[in-house]
C-alpha cells in the first residue's frame, strides 16, 4: 500500500537529530545516530499498532490510516520543536577546491559517500543474503514463500525496520 506517512519519518528523523543536538546538547553525530534509532522504532511501533491489524483489508484502508498517522506525526513534531527552519550545531567545513573551482565541503562529500555506501550495502543485502532473497520471494508470492519456510511475519517487520531506518538516514543526511 501507499504509505503517506513515510515522508514524515524523514522529517521526524531530522527534527529528532535537532532535538538531541541543540536541545539536549549531544554531539551532532551521536544525535544523528539516536535520531535514526528513534525513527526506526517509531516506524516499527506504527507498523505494529496501526498497519498490522489492517493487513487483510483492502489497500485503501491502510492508506487512509497512513494519512492520519502523517497528520499525527506532523503535529507531534511541531508540538515538541515548534515551527520554522531548525539547524544542527555542526562546525563549518572548509570547501575543497579543484583547479580553483570550489567543489564541495568535506561534510558534503561524507553525505555522498554515506549514501553510496548504503545503496551498495542494500544491494548486496537484497541480492546475496538469505533474508534479502526471502524478502524478494515474499514480495513476488507471499503464500509460496511461506510454504517454502520463510517467516513472512518476521520479514515484514524487517522490511518496516529497514524502510524506517532508510527514511531516518535520509532525514539526518
Image (cartoon, rainbow, N blue to C red):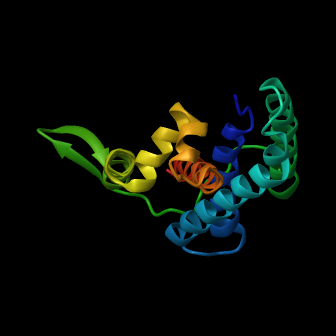
Describe residue 155's horizontal placement relative to residue 79 as left or right.
left
Residue name at image x 37 percent, y 53 percent: 114
Q: Indicate the quadrant containing the N terminus: top left, top right, bottom left or bottom right.
A: top right
Percent position (x, y) of residue 120?
A: 31, 47
Closer-to-camera residue (60/140): 140
Q: Position of residue 81 (x, y in %)?
A: 80, 55
Residue 161, compared with residue 133, is above or below; it is below
On screen, residue 131 versus residue 37, left or right, reads left
Residue 81 is left or right of residue 1, and the answer is right
Residue 102, percent across and down? 25, 39
Residue at image location 60% in from the left, 55% down from the top: 161
Residue 107, position as x, y percentages in the image:
37, 54
Instruction: Please identify the quarter of the rendering in which residue 98 is found.
Output: top left
Q: How many marks?
A: 0
Give the residue displayed 61% in from the left and 38% down from the top.
Answer: 143
- Of residues 171 and 100, the one nearer the viewer is 171
83 or 132: nearer the eye? 132
Q: Residue furthest left?
A: 99
Name of the residue lying farthest toward the front: 147
Which residue corresponds to the image point at 68% horizontal and 63% vertical from the top-left?
38
The residue lying toward the viewer, choosing from 156 and 93, is: 156
**Picture quadrant where residue 60 is located:** top right
Amino acid at each position: 500500500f501507499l504509505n503517506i506517512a513515510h515522508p514524515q519519518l524523514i522529517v521526524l528523523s531530522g527534527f529528532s537529530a535537532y532535538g538531541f543536538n541543540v536541545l539536549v546538547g549531544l554531539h551532532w553525530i551521536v544525535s544523528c545516530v539516536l535520531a535514526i534509532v528513534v525513527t526506526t522504532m517509531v516506524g516499527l511501533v506504527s507498523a505494529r499498532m496501526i498497519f498490522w491489524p489492517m493487513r487483510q483489508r483492502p489497500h485503501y484502508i491502510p492508506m487512509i490510516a497512513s494519512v492520519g498517522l502523517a497528520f499525527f506525526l506532523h503535529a507531534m513534531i511541531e508540538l515538541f520543536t515548534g515551527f520554522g527552519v531548525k539547524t544542527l550545531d555542526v562546525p563549518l567545513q572548509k570547501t575543497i577546491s579543484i583547479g580553483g573551482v570550489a567543489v564541495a565541503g568535506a561534510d558534503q562529500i561524507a553525505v555522498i559517500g554515506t549514501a553510496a555506501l548504503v545503496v551498495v550495502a542494500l544491494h548486496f543485502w537484497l541480492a546475496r543474503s538469505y533474508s534479502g532473497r526471502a524478502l524478494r520471494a515474499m514480495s513476488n508470492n507471499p503464500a509460496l514463500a511461506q510454504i517454502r519456510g520463510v517467516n513472512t511475519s518476521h520479514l515484514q517487520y524487517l522490511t518496516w525496520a529497514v524502510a524506517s531506518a532508510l527514511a531516518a538516514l535520509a532525514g539526518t543526511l
